[in-house]
Structures are given as C-alpha cells and as structure tokens.
C-alpha cells in the first residue's frame, strides 16, 4: 500500500462524521455503508431518510434498527448501547460495526407469470390447461429479519436477487387457490380481484419470516387453450339466441320472405319453408329440445337429449362439442363410401349400405392408391380392373 493510500485511510478513519445513503437506483433493497475498517467514531452523525431503515450489526449480531431521523453515536441517546451491552471501554476509541441501509419503500410493477401451463379439472370442459400473468408490489416490512434471513452479509442486495423465489411461490399459491376456489373457466375473468386477494394473503404467510410483504397483487389475465376458448365463444353465441321456438319462427319467416321473391312460385315456397324448418330443427337439437322432441314421446325425447362420448362413452347433452368427463371432442369425422358414396364414419372398414370394403384399390404395377372408378393409374399409366 502506498503512503498516499495510507493517508487516505487514516483520514477516513479519523474524519467520518456522517453516515447516510442517497439511493440513486430503482431496485436496491439493502446497501452496506462503506465504513473504513468498520470503525465508527464517537460523535458520528447517522441520517436515516424516509422509506429507509439503518441496521447496526456488531460482531455478527444485529444491534438495533433505526427508523427515519437524525442520530448521534454517543453514550447519551443511542439505543444501540442497551442492545449490544459490550462497550466496557467507553467511547475514547472507535468501535467496530457494520451499518446496513434497508430500502423500505414499495417496489411496484414487479411481474409474475406461469412458465408452464397449469392443469386443472373444470366442471364444464373437463381437464383444461391455464396460463396466467400479472403484477405485484413488494416492500421490506422487517429490516432486521430481512438482513438476517435473506440478505446476509451482501454489500448490496436488489430485487433481482429475490424475484425468482417470489415467482415460484406465486405460481404455487396461484395453482392452490384455483383448485380451492373451484372457479369455472368461463367465469375466471369476473373473479380476478378475489383471486388476487387470496393469493396475496397466502404469499404473505409464507414470507412473513423473511421480513417481506406483498402489498398489492394483480391477476391481469388467465388464458385457456384455443379450442376451449372456441367452445366458450360458441356457448355465448348459443345463449345470445335466446328462445329456440322464437328462433325457429324467425327462420320460417325468413324462408317465406325469400320464397316470395323467387320466380319458382309454389315450388320455391315449399323449398323455402322446408329450409327454414330444417335450420330451426337443427338449432333445437343443439339446445337439446325442439318440435320433434316434444311430439315423439317420452322415450324418443330422452334418447335425443344425450349423446355418448366416442372416447369414454360418457353420456353428454346433445350438441356439446367436448365431453364433460374426459374433454375429448364429440364430433366424429365422416367420409364417403369408396363405391356408393354413402356417408360412413371415419375408420369404417365396410360400407353399411353396399357392404363394399373401404380399402382403396391399388395399382397392380406400382401399388399407388387409385381413386374410385379410375381406369388407369395416374402414377405409371397401368390399366386397372375397372377399365
């Protein structure tokens, strides 16, 4: 060490009179005041500003926490003496101590979000995956506990150093709260405030021992997969239609109007009425009710009210797109018969109308699949049996 450095150190040891921290950052939680040799002279001034707390640490133990104000380190008015109780040599020489300034203001607009989807069982859509994100505000509620449990002897501690642990705790509590509240996916948007308050209370219970407090917690969005969102939109559209009977009458009136404008006369009128009632009956079936259900007897009405799920065979209301038990799609794709064009269920091996096998014919030369009725192979030109 050069003589100039020694002089500087001696000057700092001799003339440090004010201990204060002017925070020029936006994310610092703890700042250790740089006392040369950790020696504080008797008579030094301690200035603690609003939204700050000063923590004295002597020989590894927290001596005292100073709230906003101006203090003088001497034997008269410094509470640290009664806490440490080890100043048997008086104040004729410097005493060694570390001083930590803790930022007690609220750190706002801190972000959280689910890195992976959360799997939950929903009463309407079965198993669904949810993603969510939002923001929260954080502050140090107990400076002594925070230094002892989290910051330790770090010279500087910022929000980035604690943010990862907070996010993991938030996602865990978010999943538990959704499961306990049992809020249907279709109603989540109206429960963001209640959900946020519940999660905030649970997080504060977890972090009370660390000296931290989450003052505000916001759920900005909870999203569902695209297919579930489509199902929600369809259900909303069906609800907007209102009374099914009135909708059928409206369709019939439209058909009459369109038929009157056609040149086909009576034939056009009959076709228009038929189309109107057909659409109306389809809508009635989608709602689980309609003219046919009301006139076909109790047994027929009961059988048309439910449809078995093709995956788990669970009975579901007619017209729903997803199974309430397993979440599988209720719609089964249909394909035409390769010979007579009758409508068949996808995967059928034989036609229910003509009995023909549904395996497509193959070219004898190159084994390329042939379209029904093809006389020549489009790949190699070989003549087929249909020629």
Image: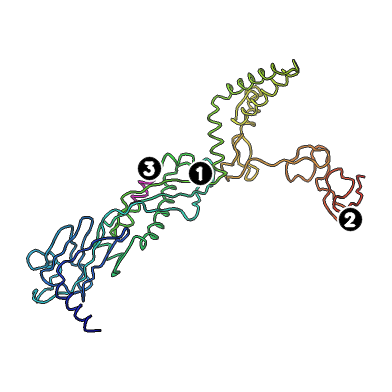
Q: Is the residue under label 3 in contact with that under label 1 (CB below 8 Å)?
A: no
Front residue (pair 213, 19): 19
Q: Is the residue under label 1 in contact with that under label 2 (CB below 8 Å)?
A: no
Residue 342 lies, in percent from the top left, at 79, 37
Q: Residue furthest bottom?
A: 2
Tag in front: 2 or 1: 2
Q: Of helix, strand and loop, which mostly describes the magenta segment?
A: helix
Q: Which dot marks residue 365?
A: 2
**Residue 51 appears left or right of 189:** left
- Point out the stretch of residues depicted in magenta: 192-201
Residue 272 lies, in percent from the top left, at 70, 21
**Residue 216 appears left or right of 347:** left
Q: Is residue 57 above or below residue 173?
A: below
What separation in Å lies between label 1 and label 3 (alpha carbons)?
20 Å
* Residue linked to disc 1: 122
- The residue under the point 38% across, 42% down is 193
């Amino acid at each position: 060490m050069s003589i100039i450095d020694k002089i500087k150190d001696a000057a700092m040891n001799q003339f440090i009179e004010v201990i204060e921290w002017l925070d020029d950052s936006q994310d610092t939680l703890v700042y250790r005041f740089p006392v040369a040799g950790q020696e504080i002279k008797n008579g030094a001034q301690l200035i603690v500003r609003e939204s700050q707390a000063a923590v004295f640490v002597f020989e590894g133990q927290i001596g005292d926490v100073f709230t906003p104000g101006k203090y003088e380190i001497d034997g008269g008015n410094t509470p640290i003496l009664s806490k440490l109780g080890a100043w048997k040599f008086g104040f004729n020489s410097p005493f060694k101590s570390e001083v930590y300034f803790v930022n007690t203001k609220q750190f706002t607009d801190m972000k959280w979000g689910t890195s992976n989807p959360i799997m939950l069982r929903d009463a309407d859509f079965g198993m669904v995956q949810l993603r969510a994100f939002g923001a929260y505000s954080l502050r140090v509620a107990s400076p002594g506990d925070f230094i002892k449990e989290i910051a330790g002897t770090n010279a500087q501690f910022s929000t980035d150093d604690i943010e990862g642990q907070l996010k993991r705790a938030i996602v865990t509590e978010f999943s538990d709260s959704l499961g306990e509240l049992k809020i249907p996916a279709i109603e989540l948007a109206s429960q963001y405030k209640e959900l946020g308050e519940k999660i905030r209370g649970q997080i504060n219970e977890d972090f009370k021992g660390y000296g931290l407090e989450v003052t505000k917690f916001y759920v900005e969005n909870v999203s569902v997969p695209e297919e579930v969102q489509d199902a929600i939109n369809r259900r909303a559209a069906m609800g907007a239609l209102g009374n099914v009977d009135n909708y059928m009458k409206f369709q019939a009136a439209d058909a009459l109007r369109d038929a009157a404008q056609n040149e086909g006369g009576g034939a056009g009128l009959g076709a228009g009425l038929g189309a109107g009632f057909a659409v109306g009956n389809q809508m009635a079936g989608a709602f689980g009710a309609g003219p046919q259900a009301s006139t076909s007897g109790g047994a027929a009405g009961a059988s048309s009210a439910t449809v078995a799920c093709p995956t788990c065979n669970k009975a579901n209301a007619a017209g729903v797109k997803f199974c309430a038990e397993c979440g599988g799609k209720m719609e089964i794709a249909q394909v035409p018969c390769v010979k007579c064009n009758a409508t068949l269920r996808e995967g059928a091996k034989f036609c229910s109308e003509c009995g023909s096998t549904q395996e497509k014919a193959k070219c004898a030369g190159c084994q390329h699949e042939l379209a029904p009725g093809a006389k020549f192979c489009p790949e190699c030109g070989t003549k087929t049996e249909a020629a």
